[in-house]
Amino acid sequence: MIDSNMNEDRYNFIVSTVKQAGDFLLDSRKKHFEVLLKEGDSRNIVTTVDLEANDFLEKAIHSAYPEEIIFSEETEDVATTRTSFWSLDPIDGTSNFARDIPHFAVVVTYMENNEPTVGAVYNPVTRELFSFKKEEGACLNGEKISVTNISTLKEAYALLHIGCSEDVREWGIGLQRIFLGKAKKTINLGSSALDLCFLAAGRVDVVIYGTMTTRDIATAVAIVRDAGGEVYDIFGNPVSMSSKPQKIIGTSNKALFDEIKKVTDSMI
């Protein structure tokens, strides 16, 4: 059972903290920062601002909740065998941030029994705060949001982000071909948490990623679910929270997912 008082405390802490981190990102992008490569891959980057924002978030969490552990895209406190922990991504959409494209976010979640219970996704440029408290619904700047009722691909707006991994390249090319022929609109924005929040808010109807790690943006998955949609693996199972990359298909309803799965089954 969820402790409602503790949940409220964590929610208020998260909202305040992601806004402070967001202000730090806005200040930092006006200054010189370094772009570093992960494992020498020029298409997989991290900036010095990611690391500084990560440090800010971890210090804030440890100050307020000193006995609790943190999982981050950039660092890990401990091995992730624990089922209750904080999960965060200091800049979701680092490539956008590095090129001054205003589609990036701070993501913070508290996980209990490996499931998100409270969290927020904050775009400091637009001042849009997507948030949720388990069993209380998903919100944008305090107002409840919900997915669309569009259930056919020909009417759907889709965000399609394949990624650059070689093992998903052919799958992605085939998927792009299908969506160019069948979807109403196909675009790529490049911030997985914000993209899922756009699905939750009814701005798009489909979000597909070829390589998504769900644990660091668990809040966004929960926001979609609380807004009435779902995020599936390619076999039709609701995705689990994992630090391993996986293909995901988020849709506003099951009918839309079923149509997509029907046309993509041969590609699995």
Image (cartoon, helix red, strand yellow):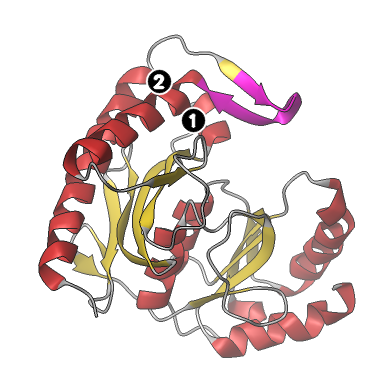
* Secondary element at image label 1: helix
Toward the viewer: 254 or 1?
Answer: 1
Residue 216's spot in the image, x, y percent?
48, 51
Image quarter hosting the C terminus: bottom right
Q: Position of residue 160 (x, y in %)?
A: 66, 58
The answer to whether residue 124 of the structure is visible from this angle is yes
Quadrant where the N terminus lies?
A: bottom left
Q: Is residue 249 above or below residue 255?
A: above
Along the viewing direction, whichever of 173 and 164 lies nearer the viewer:
164
Write down the residue under mark 1. Answer: 97
Residue matched to label 2: 29
| Residue at x 27%, y 75% (from the top left corner) | 137
Residue 41 lies in the magenta stretch: yes
Image side of residue 221 versus residue 6, left or right: right
Q: Amino acid at mark 1?
A: Phe
Question: The residue under label 2 is which amino acid type?
Answer: Arg
> Is 74 rendered above or below residue 224?
above
User: Does residue 200 appear anywhere in the picture?
Assistant: no
Residue range highlighted in magenta:
36-47
User: Residue 167, image x and y in percent?
Assistant: 86, 53
